[in-house]
Image: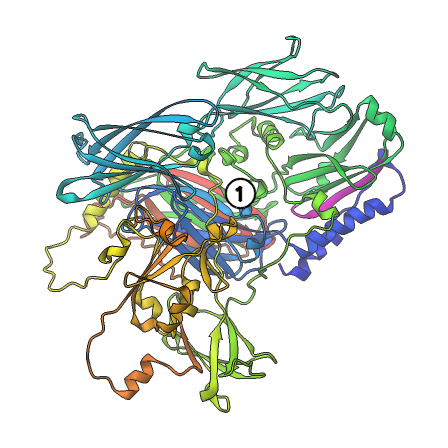
Amino acid sequence: MTLKKAALLLSLSIISILPAFAQKDTVSLTTILRKTSKLTTGYPIEKVYLHLDKPYYAAGDTIWFKAYLTVDKHSPSNLSKVVYVDITNEENTIIQSLKLPVVNSVAPGNIILSSDLFKEGNYHLRAYTAWMRNFDPDYFFNKNIVIGNSINNPLNTTISFNSSGTGNQLNINTHIIFKDAADAPLANKKVMWRVTANGDDISSGKTNTNSSGIADIAFAGKPSLLEDAILTTEVELADRKTVIKTFPLKTAAAEKDVQFFPEGGELINGVLTKVAFKALNTNGLGIGAKGNVIDNAGKIVANFTSQHLGMGAFNLIPEDGKTYKANVTFTDGTKATYSLPRARPSGVNLAVYNVDTAASITIKISSNSPYFDANRGKPYYIIAQSGGAVYFAAQTALASPVYSAAIPKSKFPTGLVQLTLFNGQGTPVSERVFFIQHHDNLTLNLTADNKVYTTRQRVKIAISAKNKKVPVEGNFSIAVVDESKVPFDENAESSILSNLLLTSDLKGYIEKPNYYFLSKNANAAQDLDILLLTQGYRRIAYSEILAGKYPPVYLLPEQHGIELSGVIRNNTGLPIAKGKLSLQIPAKNFYAETTADMVGNFKFSDLSFPDSSEVIISGRNNVNNKNLMLTANGETYQVPTLNRYVNDRILNIDTAFKPYLQNSKKQYDNSHNLKEVVIKSTTITPRHTDYPSLTGLPPEPDQVLNKDRFVGCQNLLSCLPSMLLGATVENGNIYMMSSYNSNNKLPMQVFVNGLPVDFNYLGTIDGSTVESVEFFKKDGLSGVNERYGTSGIISISLKKIKKTKISFNELQELVPPPYIMKLKPQGYSIVREFYSPKYGVTGQTAFGPDLRTTIYWNPNVTTDKTGAATVDFFNADGRGTYRATIEGFDADGNLGRYVLRYTVK
C-alpha cells in the first residue's frame, strides 16, 4: 500500500457515538482524532512474517523461508520492494545478511547453514524493511533459531547451574560434563573459559576436566549483567584442536518473579479492579503459581491460582491507607512474597468485558469518590483503534461514578484493539487492549490422495482456499516435514496468524503464541484476554502524539528496488549540474543512463542484480570527463538488535535434539562419502595471527571480507565502511554502531599488515591490493583497545607484490580513471530451488538412504479463480507421521493456515 493509499484508511474508519454517551462532539475529541490521523496516514504500519520449513536445524541444513509483507490491517504491502533477513549469533554478531526482492508482497529465500559459519547455538533470525527501521526493532519479525552441529562436533556437553548471593553480587557455580562423539567422558582435558555480557568481559580463567569429564567453573558478577551473559568454553582435544561451546546464563542468574498488572493501568482506592499476574521461572518462561493477597494488617483479601503459563487474575478493592502483598507458592514448592503496586488515592479506571461468544464487548468506567467529586460533569473521550486505524470514537460526561456501555464487535476487525480513555484535556487516563476474534480467516484445506503411504511413494495434495465460502486466488507456501524426526510443540510455533494478528503488535516476549489460535484449546480466548492484561502495547502512544512528538523518519520505503546514488564533481570538488552518467552490470548485460540534478546528485533506481556483482558507473559522456570524479553514497545497515525471544533459547542442545542431530549426521555422512582426493596445491590466506602486534585477538573474527569483495574499489576509505556490518563513519573515524549508539564513541583501530594506521590512511589503498579484511568487536587478550583507546579492530592484509611486467592497458584496468567507478554493492541474494527427488516405480535410487527431514518445500503456491491448486512430491525413507503446513494470504490480506498429517509405513 502506498502512503497516499494508506491515508484513506482513517477517513474510511467508523467514527461512532455510544447511545448512552450522547453529547455534542467537541474540539478536544476532534483534536485527538486529527493528531491520530496524522500518525496513521503518515506512518503506515508495515510488517514482515517469515514462514519457515521447520522449527530447528543442524549445521549443514538449509533454512527455507518465505517472507510475507503486509501493511496496516494486513493488506499485502506495496510499500517496500526490498526485504532484509539477518541471522545473528548469541554474541549478537551478524553471521549472514540477505537482501531479497519483493514481488507481489512476498519474497522466498533460503539460508545455507554452512558448518564453517554456524556453530552449535541459539541464533536470532530477524526480518524487516527499510521503512520498518524507522521504528522500534521490537516490531521486526523476530525468532530464536536453534542450530545443532552433528557434522564436525566431537564434543557433547551437559551443563547445570547453582547460584547464590544477594544484592549486587551473584555467585554462579557451573557443572559441565564433557563427552566425545561416542559419549565417552573427556578426562583430564584443558578448558579455557570466559564470561561476557554485551561485549564486555566479566570473568575468565582455565581449569581441567576430571576423570569423569567434569569441569566445575565458578564466577561472580552483578545479577543484571549475568542475566544477559554468555559462558564460552574452549576445550583442547588431540592434535591441539580446540572446540568452542557457548552457554547462555539467563537461567543461572535470574530469579523467579511474579508481576502484577491492574486492568486499566493502576489500582485506585475504592474501585473494584481485576488484577492480572504473571509468574516467571528463572528461564523467563511461565511457571504455575497459587497464593493469596494480604493487606498490611495481615488480612487475606484475595486468593489466586494461575490458569495458563503462570498467568491468571483476581479481583481486588484497594482501601485507603492500606498496602498489599502476595504470598506465592510455585508448582516446584518454592515460596516467595511480592508487593502489589500501590493504589492511587484518586482516579478513574477503564475495564473491558470480552466474552468470546458475545456479540458485543462491555466497557465500564469507574471512578472513586474523590475523583468523581472533582470531575463531575467534565467531558471524557473513548477512542478504539486497531492496526493504526480508528474504528470507534465517543464522548461522554462523567455523570456517575460507574458507567457501562456495550460496543458491537462488528465495528472492529479481527485482531488487537487498543481502547483508551481520555480526560477533557486530552490526557490518556486509562487504557485496555483486547482481542477481537471473528473467526473470519481464510478457510484453507489440504486433501491428500491417500491417508497412509509407503516410503518413497508419490503424494498428491489438493489445495482449496475460500473466504466466507467463496473461492479466492491466494499466494501461499507449503512445507512438509517428517514429524517423527522433527517433533515440536505446536503451541510454541510462530504462525502467520499468531504473528501478524498478535505478536507483531506487542512488545516483549510471548510464550507459546500459537496456542491462542488452535481450535483444540477451549480456553484460548479467556487465556488470551489475561495475556493482554500482562503485555505492553505501544503501537500508538497517545501522550507523545498529543504532544506533537512523531517518530523521526530517516529512511523512506524502498519502492524502486535497489538504488545506487552518488555525486559527480570536477577535480576541484565542485558539483557538476546536469552531469551525464551511465551504469553497466557486465554479468547481466545491463546498461542504463541518468542525469544528475543541479548539485551533482545522481541516482539509478529499479536495479536488480545478484550480490557481489560488479557495477560500473561512468561519467565518460561528459565534456572534459578527464577532470571529473565520482563518489558513491554508502549503504546503511541495521545494527544488531537484542533477541526478544531469548527465553526460547535451549541450553543443552546436544541432549534436547539428539534424535534430530543423529539423523542429520547420517544424512551428511551419506551425502559426503567421497573418494580420496589428492590436493596438489593450496593457497594460504593471510590472517591476523601472522602479525605479532595482533597476538591475543580472538581466534575467529566477527566478519571476514575476502579479496573478491574489493574488485573495482578505487580506494578503501570509500568502499570499506559500507561493507562492514554494524559500522558507521563520522568526522574521519570509523565506529562500531553498538558503541557509537551508547555514546561511548571510541573509534576502531585499523591495522594494515599488522601496523597501526589512521583511518584516513585507507584513502591511499586501492581495493585491488587487498587480500582480506578481518573485523573484531572485541580485542580478546591483545590489549589493543586499552593501548590505543579504541573499541574494535580492523585488520587489513594486503596482497604480496609480485615483481612482474605489466602493460599500460593492464595498468589502466587496475587503476580506472576518476570518472569511472567500479563497485560491488550488496545485491539480491541468490535463492536456491528446493530439490525434491522423483522416484521411479521400483523406489530405488543410486544415492543411498533418503534421510530428509524437510520432505517438501514450495514457496510459490498460488490458487486459481476456483480457489484450487495441487502439489505433488515423494516421501523419504522415514516412517511415522508426516506433517504438511500451508500458510499465506489473498489479495485482500485475509490470512490462512492449515495443517494436514498423514502416515508413512
Along the line of sight, the residue nearer the viewer: 830 or 775? 775
Residue drawn at 33 percent across, 84 percent down: 812
Name the spot of residue 671 as percent of width and height, x first: 21, 50
Q: Quadrant of the N terminus?
A: bottom right
Does residue 143 appear in the picture of this structure?
Answer: yes
Q: Quadrant of residue 333?
A: top left
Please state, as top left, top right, bottom left or bottom right, where the C terminus lies in the image. top left
Residue type pointed to by label 1: Asn
Q: In the image, 62: left or right of 135?
A: left
In this rendering, would 482 be left or right of 395?
left
Residue highlighted by disc 1: 499
**Image location of residue 259, percent across then percent down:** 57, 25
Front residue of 166/596: it is 166
| Magenta-tinted stretch | 387-396
Q: Is residue 392 magenta?
A: yes
- Helix, strand or loop at mark 1: helix
Residue 464 visible in the picture: no
Residue found at the far front of this picture: 787
Q: Is residue 685 magenta?
A: no
- Give the percent coordinates (x, y) of residue 708: 31, 68
Q: Main secondary structure of the magenta part?
A: strand
Residue at 71% of width from left, 43% of height from top? Answer: 542
